[in-house]
Image (cartoon, rainbow, N blue to C red):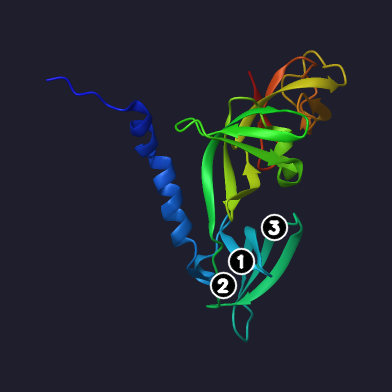
Amino acid sequence: MVLFLDLGFTNKIQCSLSKIRCFISYFLKMENYSTSQFKNGLKLMLGGNPCSIISNEIRKPGKGQASNRVKLKDLITGKTLEKTFKSGESVEGADVMELDLQYLYNDGSEWNFMDPESFEQYAIGDTSMDDARGYLVEQDMCVVTLWNNNPISVTPPNHVMLEVVNTDPGLKGDTAGTGGKPATMNTGVVVQVPLFISIGEKVKVDTRTNEYAGRT
């Protein structure tokens, strides 16, 4: 007996594990978070906008109640905020989804990404890119954050390989890496590199700190 399958229908009912995780994450993040749960990267709602925690400092005065001094980034406006929360205070979580997408190309007005499992593509405007644009390498995987089904931010990999396109001539023999100099990468970002690095070399950059992390 031969069983014929409608491939179009089969493709429609396929659901990747990454999408399932995203929908679960979507519903879980609508809960409230106590200050004891605060950590870098946690998404909270403040002033009607989703914000991401950049740093969380716990302060314990000699007298009085402890507090959390939190620095956040507004994912809509791009502005950095500083808020103080009383210990034990709860804040509404942001109902965002995070997708693992592959960066394809920039067409001059939008940055294009693709889900490598479903092949669904997303076009992201320049205003949502922020500092990520300096670390995007074609084919690299990134985390794209959606809010109300719209892309609002892009997080590049922790480390990327970039090519030096402009810097002062390298100093031969200075392999110890003492000192440093600014170098412009092929993406436009400027990174402080050791003196022995020359134009044309590829270097490893930590996207979280914009620091040189080695070379090929």
Of residue 52 and residue 161, the one placed in the foreground of this image is 52
Residue at the left extreme, as displayed:
1
Chain-order first, disc 3 or disc 1: 1
Q: Amino acid at mark 1?
A: Met
Badge 1 is on which residue?
45
Q: What is the C-alpha distance between the residues marked 2 and 1?
A: 7 Å
64 displayed left or right of 26: right
Mark 3 crowdedness (10 Å alpha carbons): few <14, some 14-19, many ≥20: many
Q: Which residue occupies 55% across, 78% down?
A: 89
Q: Residues within 10 Å of mark 2 (few under 14, many from 20)?
A: some
Placement of 93 over or under 157, stated as above or below: below
Q: Is residue 9 above or below residue 162?
A: below
Q: What residue does disc 3 label?
A: 73
Sequence-wise, the earlier of marks 3 and 2 is 3
Write the residue at 80% across / 13% down: 172
The mark lying in front, picked from 3 and 1, is 1
Amino acid identity at mark 3: Lys
